[in-house]
Amino acid sequence: MGSVSRLLKNTSVLIASNIITKGLSALFIIYLARYLEDFGFGQYNFALAFASVFIIFSDMGLDALTIKNVARKPEEAGQYLETVGIFRLGLSLIMIAMALLVGYLMGLSNYLLMVILAAGMTYLFDKMSGLFYALFRAKERMELEAGTQIVWKIVQIGLGFAAIYMGFSLMSIMLVLLVSSVVKTIVGFSVLLAIGVRPERGQLKQKTLAIKAAPFAAYEIGNALYLNLAVIMLFFLTAPEDTGWFSAAFRIFLFAMLIPSAFDAAIYPLFSRLHDKSRSDMKFAYGKSIKYTLVAVMPVAVMLAILSTEFAGLFGPDFENTSQALFVMAGVLPLFTLNNLMKTALWSGDYQKRIAYNIWISAGVLAIAAYVLVMREGYVGAAMALIIGETAFFILNYGGIRRKKYPMGKYLWKPVVAGLAMAGIALLMYWTIGDQVTNLYIAIVSAIAYALLVLGMGVFTKSDRQLFKEVLSRDKSQ
């Protein structure tokens, strides 16, 4: 019980942080899309996607390995800070050079290459600060990560809005974002020093780390390709405008992932400890995590579909077509959530190779689906390809979960049934009274119906209520 209570508390901290940081990010992205319009926004997202495919090689799965090992041996934090930090800096510089070389050979314009360079340097500092956050998570000091992220986001958004107000070009805006990433790195390192974590030489060797991190690296690289394939294919096979419409929808989709992302971040160090100490506690915590996140995500997915036109309208008249892609992406949200949680559980259970295998197969499925569907349906086809890729990933992950004998089905069926019923109610209202009421009205009524169904079906058991009371009582005592 104590472990799950700590999980809920850490998750609540990260959710609060995500609401603030992602809310600010969403506001900035909306204004940036309006400022750059669909063509410029397409270039912006292509540069980010292209750079990220290369810079991910500097990650090499080292953040995941750091969290897992430092969670088990906190005294090694300083050694991981120094060894991983030096390794990552060198790899990042090499991969930025590779990105520029490949872009040049592909015939990209000099201007776009400069934007990619700025994006790559921004990712370099983001990856360095990512190591600091990995150490915060390993020590389960989520409040430190949350505070650092909020400070950085305020700086980034402030500088970004100033750049837009002053009429800066895309290249100049990218340089402003680079400055904010440098600030984030400085703040994160300063916080680490403040809690007593300092670079320290030890027995860790870069070669040894690379070998141990290889399964994590295989997943991270495959995942980077997986998440950016659709954007890159759209840019080369269609017009930049299509890339902009799809990217706007994907940004909204990622914002909707804030609760699952918080859970994913909070459970990894916890699961890593519980796997060696108490398998029964780990299964209990895993089952509860699956249920809580799915209960939260199902209504968000349905409301995302209902209000897709309204959300697309936030980006301005150039992004009307975004609503079609967003409507399709809404179906990806529950699958994406479950895949994240299954991936984290299998990582914690030393199934890293299995997850790497799964993501590469899924990336292959996505690539084929994206090529076929983008050629036929454009940006909507790219969104459809995401559903196909996530379904493949889910099937493969479920096989690993079954082998590990982690609970799944008994925690899934009630939230899924309630979510499908909510979708059915919304669809019925749209068919019968859709011309008399707004989409917002349909969303609110269907959400209320969902809440009543969840309560009526007894989704939250006595043990759930006890956990909530324990968390609240601890917060009050502190």
Image (tube, rainbow, N blue to C red):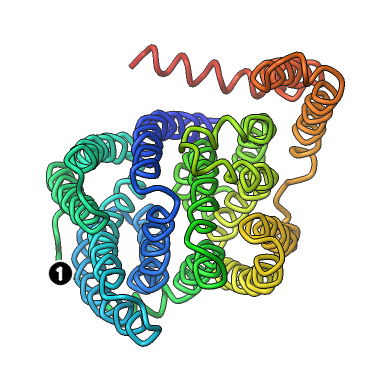
- Residue 206 is left or right of residue 289, and the answer is left
| Closer to the camera in the image, 448 or 117 | 117
Q: Is residue 385 above or below residue 18?
A: below
Please identify the quadrant where the N terminus is shown: top right
Q: Residue at x 52, y 36 (%)?
A: 259
Please identify the quadrant where the C terminus is shown: top left
Q: Is residue 14 above or below residue 269?
A: above
Q: Is residue 245 above or below residue 52?
A: above
Q: Residue 236, position in %: x, y? A: 51, 72
How dense is the environment of label 1, judged by Cα within 10 Å: few (below 14), some, or many (20 and up)? some
- Residue 29 is left or right of residue 77, and the answer is right
Q: Residue at x 55, y 54 (%)?
A: 344
Q: Residue 463, position in %: x, y? A: 66, 23
Q: Residue furthest front?
A: 317
Q: Residue 176, position in %: x, y? A: 18, 50
| Closer to the camera in the image, 376 or 135 | 376
> Badge 1 is on which residue?
201
Q: Residue at x 65, y 45 (%)?
A: 324
- Residue 2 is left or right of residue 298, and the answer is left
Q: Quadrant of residue 166?
A: top left
- Look at the image and tell me whether residue 76 can be seen: no
Q: Quadrant of residue 111?
A: bottom left
Residue type, label 1: Arg
| Closer to the camera in the image, 288 or 416 | 416
- Which secondary structure, mark 1? loop
